Image (cartoon, helix red, strand yellow):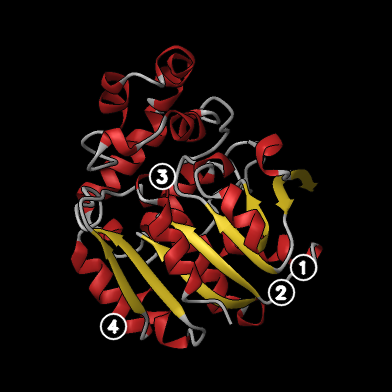
């Protein structure tokens, strides 16, 4: 991943992040139980247009965990520290799922560091429901990804494997997930040290009461067939933020790998 995109790994304390490209700063925040590798389909294009800073959130990938019982604001503080270390604010911040919720907390707590937001299927509304909470805690406890991840080396190019791993909970069209995206989504599954704290922080946070305090431009991007977060959440985020909404047809929760060009088009809306 880093060799293909000329990204350089760096550490800030126990936090691993990657930097590459030139131009306007763009911070990438992945979803729950993900890693920087989740952006693999987008990185070759992004480093041609932006100075990309891609973060492994605490407890994920190569980043150590936060102290006991962190909040989403604590995760946002880590992202702020990385931006400050790189002298890269204000930046456009793109967050997927849990990363979208962290992006919102960053924009609310440190508005001087955020010029614009791309929220790709952000968590925070439906994740307050009990069934979603139970699923999040169960999956971050059992961590099924660590068992299927080693098989990717042999089967990432097989249609049946991608269907078995990603449908129906993650994607609408499993065949749109390329072998390289499959590796990017699964490569860090055995590195994670504490995804449950992120799950707890996610389900404890309802950002809606604070959205009126976010004034930077925002674009909300949503898969029309997202099996995890309903399209009604997209409408509510758009209304409360005064944001622009883009809905991607025949697309599930993993928009960043199912329809990467939709992400690039949405980011273009935030360019000066």
The local secondary structure at tag 2 comes to loop
**Which numbered tag is attached to residue 151?**
none
- Local crowd at mark 4 within 10 Å, few (<14), some, or many (≥20)? few
Position of residue 51 in the picture relative to residue 140 (left or right): right
- Report crowding for label 2: few under 14, some 14 to 19, many 20 or more residues within 10 A (C-alpha): many
The numbered mark at residue 257 is: 3
> Label 1, label 2: how many angstroms apart (C-alpha)?
7 Å
Residue bearing mark 4: 239
Badge nearest the viewer, 4 or 3:
3
Q: Which x, y percent locates residue 46?
A: 59, 56
Q: Which of marks 3 and 2 is in front?
A: 3
Q: Distance between the residues labelled 4 and 1?
A: 31 Å
Q: Residue 84 carries which label?
A: 1
Q: Which of marks 1 and 2 is in front?
A: 2
Q: In which quarter of the image is the C terminus?
A: bottom right
The residue carrying mark 2 is 89
């Amino acid at each position: 991943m880093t060799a293909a995109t000329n990204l350089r790994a760096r550490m800030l304390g126990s936090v691993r992040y990657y930097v590459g490209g030139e131009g306007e700063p763009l911070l990438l925040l992945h979803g729950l139980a993900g890693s920087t590798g989740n952006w693999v389909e987008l990185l070759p294009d992004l480093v041609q247009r932006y100075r990309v800073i891609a973060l492994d959130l605490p407890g994920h990938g190569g980043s150590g965990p936060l102290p006991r019982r962190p909040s989403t604001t604590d995760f946002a503080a880590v992202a702020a520290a990385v931006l400050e270390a790189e002298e890269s604010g204000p930046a456009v911040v793109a967050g997927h799922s849990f990363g979208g919720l962290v992006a919102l907390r960053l924009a609310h707590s440190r508005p001087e560091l955020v010029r614009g937001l791309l929220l790709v299927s952000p968590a925070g509304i439906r994740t307050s429901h009990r069934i979603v909470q139970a699923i999040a805690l169960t999956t971050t406890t059992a961590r099924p990804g660590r068992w299927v991840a080693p098989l990717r080396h042999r089967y990432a190019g097989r249609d049946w494997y991608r269907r078995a791993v990603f449908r129906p909970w993650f994607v609408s069209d499993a065949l749109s997930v390329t072998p390289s995206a499959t590796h990017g989504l699964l490569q860090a599954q055995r590195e994670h040290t504490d995804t449950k704290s992120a799950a707890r922080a996610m389900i404890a946070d309802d950002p809606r009461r604070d959205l009126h305090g976010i004034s930077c431009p925002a674009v909300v991007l949503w898969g029309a067939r997202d099996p995890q977060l309903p399209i009604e959440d997209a409408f509510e985020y758009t209304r409360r933020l005064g944001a622009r909404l883009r809905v991607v047809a025949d697309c599930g929760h993993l928009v960043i790998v199912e329809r990467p060009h939709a992400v690039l088009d949405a980011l273009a809306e935030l360019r000066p």
